[in-house]
Structures are given as structure tokens and as C-alpha cells.
Amino acid sequence: MKRLGLGGLFFAWLYGVPFLLLVGLIRRVSDPYTPTYAQAEAFGATTDALLTTGLLLNAALPVVGLLLAGLAGEELWRRHFAGAFVGVALIYVAVALMGSMAATTLIGHVPADQEPAPRITQCIPISGGRGCPGG
């Protein structure tokens, strides 16, 4: 049972973290249809949650796995989780490179909404008589 739990934890890190990060990065570069600002803000918040969760789990899962493997006396899984720190560093370097190439920040960006500009129903004249149609 110990091996199954440690294996699940290891493969959750190996496949789950890159999945979360890839989905978050795909959402960050996509141009979603968000007709209102609230929907655009919700889309950005979900994307931020995916990226933040992926980045936190990237560090947390190998640490927890290494501790549990050490406590359980599982040498094989201890070596796997110790080696996973190379992958942790590579994932952080890859995300940092992608972030440096992006036009906006990876976390904290709200996409543009497609809300139409409000109609102007009155004219406020500018000094000198210009600015309103018809003088």
C-alpha cells in the first residue's frame, strides 16, 4: 500500500503538474470570448489559479514524497523523489523562460473584454466652440 501511494504521488507530480501548467499557459495566450469585464476577470482568475497551483505543487509534491518515502523506508521512491528536484528546477526554468517571452505577465493578467463602448448621448463643448457637431 505504501508503494502504491508513493507511486501515485510521484506520477501526480510527473504528469499532473505539467498538465496544469500547460493548460494555464494555453489559456494565457488564448483570446477568449468574454463579452463582459466580469467574465474576462473570471477567465483570468481561473488561469491564475491553474498556474499558481501548478507552480506550488511542482515544489510541494517532491518534498512531501521525499519525506514520506524516508519515513516509510522506501529507498526506491526516495531516489525517485530526490531525482525529481532536477525536474522541479527544469520546470521553473521553462516557466520563467516562457514568462520572459510573453507580452504580458503570466499571473495577474485579465484579458480584454468585447463589451461595446458606451454610446455618447450628449455633447460637452470644448473651449473655443469646437468639439460638438454643428458648432
Image: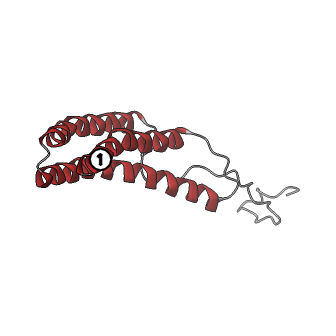
Left or right: where 39 falls relative to 82: right
Q: Nearer the viewer, residue 87 or 92?
A: 87
Residue furthest front as drawn = 1
- Specify the quadrant of the image occupied by residue 81: top left
Vertical relation: 123 (above or below) 130: below
Left or right: where 94 falls relative to 30: left
Residue furthest right as drawn = 134
Q: Nearer the viewer, residue 54 or 104?
A: 54
Left or right: where 63 falls relative to 116: left
Is residue 109 in sight in this rendering?
A: no
Vertical relation: 64 (above or below) 26: below
Place of residue 55 in the rendered image (x, y in percent of width and height, measured from the top left): 33, 48
Vertical relation: 36 (above or below) 61: below
Q: Which residue is identified by label 1?
A: 4
Place of residue 63 in the rendered image (x, y in percent of width and height, measured from the top left): 19, 51
Which residue corresponds to the image point at 57% horizontal and 49% vertical from the top-left?
111
Place of residue 14 in the rendered image (x, y in percent of width and height, measured from the top left): 33, 39
Q: Nearer the viewer, residue 25 or 110?
A: 25
Is residue 13 in sight in this rendering?
A: yes
Which residue corresponds to the image point at 23% horizontal and 47% vertical from the top-left?
62
Residue type pointed to by label 1: Leu
Left or right: where 62 falls relative to 128: left
User: What is the count of numbered marks?
Assistant: 1
Q: Secondary structure at mark 1?
A: helix
Q: Nearer the viewer, residue 61 or 97?
A: 61
- Label 1: few (<14), some (14–19) or many (≥20) C-alpha neighbours in 10 Å: few
